[in-house]
């Protein structure tokens, strides 16, 4: 079984990827030095009075990797194993992600070392408000726009927004995204990341000459991204044979398999709000309950790692079935460079994370545009634009990969890094 | 039941005009009746019509993509709209509920891409599955919405397109559509809708976009005039969008075999009053009042002066000379214009009729049956040859070949309720015990809408009871202009098995001869009697008044007979009679 332990340093991995692309682009040293590290970092303490009356101090972060193309954009994660390096890596990936889908935003990321499973809602609210108070001067619609991420939700965003508006005096719905729809959120935001993954899968299947209806997939994760990816993939005709998720009680993950296709609604009916599926109820519904890593070993055409980073590694990459034709990285950094090399050698088509999962930030951008204008779009309009944006980005990456004989990941990096580098040069930062 | 499906069509590659294919699909389901018809045209054009058959004239299917029925299924199910449909809401409430629902996510990107590159009007048309399954056209039953699609902001164009698609989906469940499907012995829940998104054939003239000519032609016609035989067929032409013809408004009918033979007008002056004076166009100008649930939201009606200003009348009109009560060809002199298509049909300035005849013949060969075609054409600026002939639809015609003999002499027989030598249809109907008629006493054209509403209510009731009936009214059935006839849509009278359009001194108009509902009538084999009050046709109003009323108001009477009527129509002679059997005779 796979545990949530971190055996890799994400930031080193992100830097290695950047160095590789900087070589392809032949970037000058100053640009490399600028882009290899965040522009700004904030590390701070968040004291909280707990429900039992005791005081406890949580560690918080905000990393602003680059804002040459626009205000920083990135989620705030609540995770017990959060590290500064993880946040740095994720901020850097946000920069490339915004650039590759060509939205006018830079990259940022934040986090708090905590486990919401063990915190009351009031305690979580205090963490959210404390997080904003610590860096309020460097947040805002023109500077840095937070969003939900792992184990944070629309409710957390409302608390952060309220704290920000209380301090600043006024209403700034564009300060934060991922808000509930009735408080300035965007229709379609909940679906955006998962649907975005499938928009790119759909385009990749066209390139591979496959019909969605003839394919089967295995999905890691059962949170918001995975659920919506499964939903749209099934709607375009695909069959999901296996999903996996984290079991909070056992502190391990399990895979749930049904070879003729999982029933999304049935699984949602036996899952908790974090996407943890009840093992016994799943067995009762006829699912095989397998060790977590089994999701990777299924005889399917498509793998969608939609959970967390470092899930396809040198240790398990060779367990991938030879039948697999496509991997779509719905999660950030799910594949280590060593595993990436093996996948490439095996001829498996891979849609890299910051392209595949860019639907979320793209829709966040739409939300911010709507919030700033205080004019909100129909869901049709949001999802229609999202599809076009994702498809255009996919096509641009795919064409570059074909023309320059690059992997999809390298091609996406080349597009993202070159756009950011150009913006830095245009501003005469380098 | 499923008809042609998407494997017959290439997928939409997000390039509407610039793609390899001009006829594509979105989705994986069936393409519906109109989609199937267009596939047949595609086959016809590829296999039968050699390139350059008509020099200077491009004959083609206007570029389109079909949104297949699986998208309709997804729309209905994901938004739980069958629950809404089950409530049998009024049409406007239903349409509103559909506007609130979300189109399937897998469709939106394609629609957004489409409007991103197209800046000219689009027609969003229904293409029903039952229409295809029953091999039967549902002409005028479901909605078509034209959108100008010329707003500078692609977001606005996208919203208008999305609204139009939802409106067409909603029209699947409008009251008249429910009634219509009930007549087919299917359930409305079985119906599925594909949607055609098609470029509108035409040219822009200021705020108006329209084709120079729209037309419908049929290769068989049980209504005859002049020398024409049924197999000579009939064509109906109109200036501007084809809505003029669909609505049963004034347009020009002729036999393709006898294009120079004018319909029977009493005089040139009479022709001036009985030919088209208005036409429909897509409104490219100032945005109209926002009303996404109105079919004509983006349409406008214009007059002949507007068309003359646009320079589109030249190949379509003659000019009336009041001094001599004659028509002079073309527009050489000032004067009232008469849309009689003489430059095209008499002086052959363009091979329009030749193209129509060829396509009817080829259509019959491809379908192995009598056919109906729809088309629209634009001419080059100098009014010479058609630069473009858009082939919009081909459908099989349901034609009865039952041998029924009704001669002119039979029309004088005793005991007839009704006798006419102006009858469409063919065959015998002998089970009718219900008659719904507009009361002639006190009828005035200003009451036409009320008469239509009351007849629609009787139609609903008789449909629910499963009782077909004989319908009698004044003027042109289905006219949108209440001064010309009773403004109903087919679904409001679809329970009638025989229909009479009569004249009165107060409603003395040129009868439609069923032009509005022709296809529905021929599909369901409904007889259509024309009875002029000043002609030699007979309609025994006194006998009707003596029959017992099931319901009656001051405008409409519904009588129920003890013994059935006998309806006989001879399609070869165009003569027909309705006879009361013994119990009602007097």
Image (cartoon, rainbow, N blue to C red):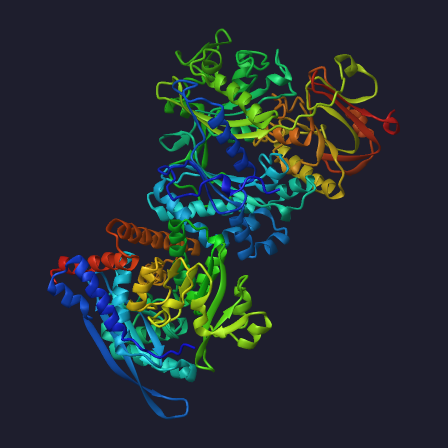
Viewer-nearest residue: A334 or B148: A334
User: How far from the left and from the top, in percent, is residue A184?
Assistant: 38, 65
Instruction: Report whether B141 appears left or right of A228.
Output: right
Task: Evaluate whether residue B320 shows in this view.
Answer: yes
In the depicted structure, whether residue B227 falls above or below residue A93: above
The residue lying at 69 percent from left, 25 percent from top is B400
Circle count: 0
In the depicted structure, whether residue B465 falls above or below residue A410: above
User: How far from the left and from the top, in percent, is residue A314?
Assistant: 33, 70
Task: Evaluate whether residue A139 shows in this view.
Answer: no
Q: Residue furthest top?
A: B324
User: How far from the left and from the top, in percent, is residue B395?
Assistant: 57, 30
The residue lying at 20 percent from left, 57 percent from top is A418
User: How far from the left and from the top, in percent, is residue B16?
Assistant: 39, 39
Quarter of the figure with the C terminus of chain A: bottom left
In the depicted structure, whether residue B393 falls above or below residue A330: above
Instruction: Report whether A363 appears left or right of B537.
Output: left
Quarter of the figure with the N terminus of chain A: bottom left
Instruction: Report whether A77 appears left or right of B326.
Output: left
The residue lying at 67 percent from left, 46 percent from top is B187
In the depicted structure, whether residue B133 falls above or below residue A343: above
């Amino acid at each position: 079984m796979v545990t949530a332990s971190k055996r890799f340093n994400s930031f080193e991995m992100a830097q290695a990827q950047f160095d590789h692309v900087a070589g392809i682009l032949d970037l000058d040293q100053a640009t490399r030095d600028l882009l290899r590290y965040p522009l700004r970092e904030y590390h701070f303490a968040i004291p909280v009075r707990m429900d039992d009356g005791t005081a406890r101090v949580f560690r918080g972060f905000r990393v602003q990797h680059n804002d040459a193309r626009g205000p920083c954009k990135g989620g705030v994660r609540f995770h017990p194993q959060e590290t500064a390096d993880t946040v740095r890596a994720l901020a850097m990936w946000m920069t490339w992600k915004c650039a590759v889908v060509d939205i006018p935003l830079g990259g940022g990321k934040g986090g708090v070392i905590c486990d919401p499973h063990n915190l009351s809602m009031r305690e979580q609210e205090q963490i959210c408000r404390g997080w904003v108070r610590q860096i309020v001067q460097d947040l805002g619609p023109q500077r840095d726009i937070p969003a939900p991420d792992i184990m944070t939700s629309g409710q957390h965003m409302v608390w952060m927004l309220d704290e920000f508006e209380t301090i600043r005096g006024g209403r700034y719905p564009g300060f934060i995204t991922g808000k509930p729809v009735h408080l300035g959120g965007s229709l379609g935001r909940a679906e955006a990341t998962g649907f975005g993954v499938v928009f790119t899968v759909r385009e990749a299947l066209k390139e591979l000459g496959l019909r969605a209806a003839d394919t089967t997939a295995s999905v890691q994760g059962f949170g918001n991204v995975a659920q919506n990816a499964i939903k749209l993939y099934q709607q375009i005709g695909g069959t999901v044979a296996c999903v996996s998720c984290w079991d909070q009680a056992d502190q391990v993950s399990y895979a749930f398999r049904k070879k003729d296709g999982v029933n999304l609604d049935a699984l949602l009916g036996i899952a908790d709000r974090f996407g943890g599926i009840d093992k016994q109820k799943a067995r009762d519904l006829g699912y095989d309950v397998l060790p977590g890593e089994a999701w990777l070993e299924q005889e399917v055409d498509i793998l969608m790692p939609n959970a967390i980073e470092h899930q396809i590694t040198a240790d398990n990459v060779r367990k991938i079935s030879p039948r697999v034709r496509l991997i779509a990285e719905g999660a950030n950094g799910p594949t280590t460079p060593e595993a990436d090399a093996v996948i490439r050698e095996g001829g498996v088509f891979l849609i890299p994370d910051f392209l595949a999962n860019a639907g979320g930030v793209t829709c966040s951008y739409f939300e911010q545009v709507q919030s700033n204008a205080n004019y909100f779009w129909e869901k049709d309009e949001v999802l229609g634009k999202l599809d076009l944006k994702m498809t255009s980005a996919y096509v641009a990456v795919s064409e570059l990969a074909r023309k320059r004989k690059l992997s999809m990941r390298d091609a996406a990096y080349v597009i993202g890094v070159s756009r950011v580098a150009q913006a830095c040069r245009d501003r005469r930062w380098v | 039941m499923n008809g042609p499906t998407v494997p017959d069509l290439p997928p939409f590659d997000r390039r509407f005009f610039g793609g390899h294919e001009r006829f594509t699909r979105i989705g994986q389901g069936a393409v519906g009746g109109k989609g199937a018809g267009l596939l047949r045209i595609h086959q016809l054009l590829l296999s039968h019509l050699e390139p350059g058959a008509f020099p200077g004239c491009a004959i083609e299917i206007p570029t389109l993509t079909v949104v297949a029925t699986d998208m309709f299924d997804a729309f209905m199910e994901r938004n739980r709209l069958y629950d809404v449909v089950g409530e049998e809401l009024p049409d406007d409430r239903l349409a509103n509920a559909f506007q609130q629902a979300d189109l399937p996510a897998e469709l939106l990107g394609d629609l957004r891409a489409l409007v991103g590159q197209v800046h000219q009007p689009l027609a969003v048309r229904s293409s029903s599955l039952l229409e295809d399954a029953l091999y039967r056209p549902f002409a005028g039953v479901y909605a078509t919405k034209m959108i100008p699609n010329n707003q500078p902001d692609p977001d606005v164009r996208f919203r208008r397109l999305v609204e139009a698609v939802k409106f067409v989906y909603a029209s699947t469940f409008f009251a008249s559509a429910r009634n219509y499907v009930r007549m087919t012995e299917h359930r409305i829940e079985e119906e599925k809708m594909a949607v055609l998104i098609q470029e509108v054939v035409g040219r822009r003239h200021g705020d108006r976009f329209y084709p120079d000519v729209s037309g419908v032609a049929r290769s068989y016609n049980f209504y005859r005039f002049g020398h024409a035989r049924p197999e000579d067929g009939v064509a109906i032409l109109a200036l501007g969008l084809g809505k003029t013809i669909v609505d049963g408004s004034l347009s020009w009918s002729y036999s393709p075999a006898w294009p120079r033979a004018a319909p029977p007008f009493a005089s040139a002056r009479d022709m001036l009053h009985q030919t088209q004076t208005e036409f429909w166009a897509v409104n490219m100008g100032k945005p109209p009042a926002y009303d996404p649930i109105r079919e004509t939201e983006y349409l406008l009606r214009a007059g002949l002066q507007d068309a003359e200003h646009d320079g589109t009348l030249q190949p379509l009109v003659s000019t009336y000379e009041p001094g001599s009560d004659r028509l002079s060809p073309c527009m050489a002199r000032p004067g009232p214009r008469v849309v009689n298509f003489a430059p095209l049909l008499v002086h052959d300035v363009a091979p329009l009729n030749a193209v129509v005849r060829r396509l009817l013949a080829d259509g019959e060969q491809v379908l192995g049956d009598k056919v109906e075609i729809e088309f629209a054409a634009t001419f080059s600026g100098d009014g010479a040859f058609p630069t473009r002939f858009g082939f919009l639809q081909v459908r099989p015609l349901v034609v009865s070949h039952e041998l029924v003999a009704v001669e002119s002499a039979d029309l004088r027989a005793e005991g007839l309720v009704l006798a006419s030598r102006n009858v469409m249809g063919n065959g015998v109907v002998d089970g009718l015990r219900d008659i719904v008629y507009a009361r002639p006493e006190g009828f005035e054209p200003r009451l036409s809408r009320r008469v239509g509403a009351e007849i629609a209510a009787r139609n609903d009731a008789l449909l629910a009871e499963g009782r077909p009936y004989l319908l009698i009214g004044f003027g042109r059935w289905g006219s949108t202009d209440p001064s010309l006839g009773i403004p109903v849509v087919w679904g409001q009278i679809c329970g009638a098995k025989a229909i009479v359009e009569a004249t009165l001194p107060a409603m003395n108009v040129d009868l439609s001869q069923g032009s509005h509902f022709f296809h529905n009538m021929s599909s369901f084999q409904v007889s259509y009697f024309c009875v002029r009050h000043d002609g030699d046709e007979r309609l025994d109003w006194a006998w009707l008044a003596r029959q017992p009323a099931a319901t009656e108001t001051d405008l409409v009477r519904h009588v129920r007979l003890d013994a059935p009527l006998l309806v006989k129509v001879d399609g070869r002679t165009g003569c027909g009679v309705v006879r009361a059997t013994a119990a009602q005779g007097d």
